[in-house]
């Protein structure tokens, strides 16, 4: 199979999949086709909407999201590092501990600023 034929097959399967999902969505839509956006919208895991979508939120959520991203990036870098550390030796271990130290400084700063306090 040539490269272009394989690309055409994968593209066709993708388009068929998207068409299938749209067709199933059309069949399972709300009763009688009546669309009420605030009731039928997927918001808050199916719970009823109690506030507007662009309402204000506390800035603490942004700080918490940044702390989460820091730990998420830590895991993203640590998984490949575990495969390379055996071949690279002690230098890779030192680099990872420096990286973890920088993250620890960030967590200490967030703690000092009260990012983990909920009251």
Image (spheres, rainbow, N blue to C red):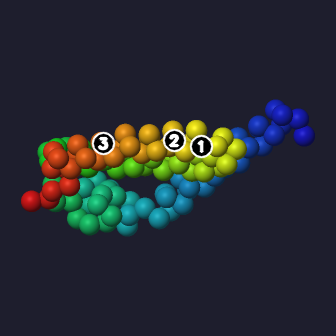
Which residue is identified by label 3? 105
Of the image marks 1 and 3, the number of the one nearer the N terminus: 1
Farthest right residue? 1
Of the image marks 2 and 3, the number of the one nearer the N terminus: 2
* Residue 50: quarter of image: bottom left
The reply, left or right, for residue 76 in relation to residue 7 is: left
Residue at 15% x, 50% y is 114
- Compute the Cα span from label 2 to label 1: 6 Å
- Between label 2 and label 3, give the one nearer the viewer: 2
The reply, left or right, for residue 110 in relation to residue 1 is: left
| Percent coordinates x, y for residue 105 in the rendering | 30, 42
Q: Secondary structure at mark 1?
A: helix
Residue count near mark 2 (Cα–Cα under 10 Å), binned few <14, some 14–19, many ≥20: few
The reply, left or right, for residue 98 in relation to residue 23 is: left
The circle on residue 11 is none
| Percent coordinates x, y for residue 61 in the rendering | 22, 49
Residue count near mark 1 (Cα–Cα under 10 Å), binned few <14, some 14–19, many ≥20: few
The circle on residue 94 is 2
Q: Secondary structure at mark 2?
A: helix
Between 12 and 57, the residue placed more toward the observer is 57
Between 84 and 34, the residue placed more toward the observer is 84
Which residue is identified by label 1? 90
- Compute the Cα span from label 1 to label 3: 23 Å
Between 76 and 22, the residue placed more toward the observer is 76
Residue at 90% x, 40% y is 1
Farthest left residue? 119
- Compute the Cα span from label 2 to label 3: 17 Å
* Residue 29: quarter of image: bottom left
- Between label 1 and label 3, give the one nearer the viewer: 1
């Amino acid at each position: 199979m040539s490269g272009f034929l394989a690309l055409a097959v994968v593209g066709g399967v993708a388009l068929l999949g998207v068409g299938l999902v749209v067709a199933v969505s059309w069949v399972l839509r709300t009763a009688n086709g009546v669309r009420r956006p605030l009731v039928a919208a997927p918001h808050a895991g199916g719970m009823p909407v109690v506030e507007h979508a662009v309402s204000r939120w506390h800035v603490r959520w942004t700080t918490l999201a940044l702390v989460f991203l820091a730990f998420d990036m830590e895991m993203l870098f640590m998984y490949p590092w575990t495969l390379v550390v055996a071949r690279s030796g002690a230098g890779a271990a030192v680099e990872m501990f420096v990286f973890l130290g920088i993250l620890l400084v960030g967590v200490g700063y967030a703690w000092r600023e009260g990012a983990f306090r909920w009251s």
